[in-house]
Amino acid sequence: ASVPELTDVSDEPESTFELYGPDSRRPGSYAANCILARRLAERGVRFIQLFHPDWDHHSRLRSWCTARCRDTDQASAALVRDLKQRGLLEDTLVIWGGEFGRGVAGQGKWDSPEGGRDHHPRCYTVWMAGGGVKPGMTYGTTDDFSYNVAENPVHVRDLHATVMHLMGINHEQFSYRFQGLDFRLTGVEEARVVHDILA
């Protein structure tokens, strides 16, 4: 029953669309969905997922990556700013991540407009805002080639444990025994909460 009211953005001031960028008036765009995410958060929706479907740039990196950043950068920053100015960021955890890492070496002819980059699973970037995370900090570094973690590694299971901790869930208490293993929400291997990033 609330969907028509939620998706009717005619009550949004012009300043909202200016904040989220020129694409924010186009229904279904990433920017428009960021506005809907804020509207969902205002209405108490607990879990909201946004995604941009076009990041797999094995070719044409110069044009495609530039266009995808244009789609997402302003709108993502606007969402955080908008949540903060409305007093929602303190209780809202924003997590932004790509599919996984990309190597610095080119795929295909690097000096060609067709050049791209291949995947690599060892390093990637996630940024978080609000919801109990320290603002304005960087945690962890890679080597000069962005290939290996050089300092403060955070495994995916550690990220999951940290996110659950921020939601008030002890990941070690949610486990069940199956075929001799204790299965937790973070998997069967040890996971840790990354306290250094918590406010």
Image (tube, grey):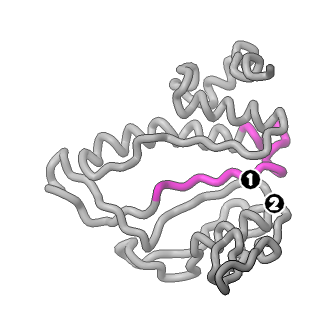
- Circle 1 sits on which residue? 93
**Span colored in magenta:** 82-99
Q: Residues within 10 Å of mark 2 (few under 14, many from 20)?
A: some
Along the viewing direction, whichever of 83 and 28 lies nearer the viewer: 28
Dot 1 or dot 2, earlier in sequence: 1
Residue 164 or residue 153, whichever sits in front: 164
In this view, 32 is above or below 54: above
From mark 1 to mark 2, how far is it between C-alphas? 9 Å
> Mark 2: which amino acid?
Met
Q: Tag 2's secondary structure?
A: loop
User: What's the residue at 15%, 54% (across, down)?
Assistant: 111
- Left or right: where does residue 106 sit relative to residue 163? left
In the picture shown, does residue 25 fall above or below 44?
above
Position of the N terminus, as image quadrant, is top right
| Residue 137, x across and y down, in percent | 65, 66
The amino acid beneath tag 1 is: Leu
For label 2, the residue is 167
Residue 92 is left or right of residue 149, and the answer is: right
Residue 6 highlighted magenta (yes or no): no
Task: Specify whether residue 86 is painted magenta.
Answer: yes
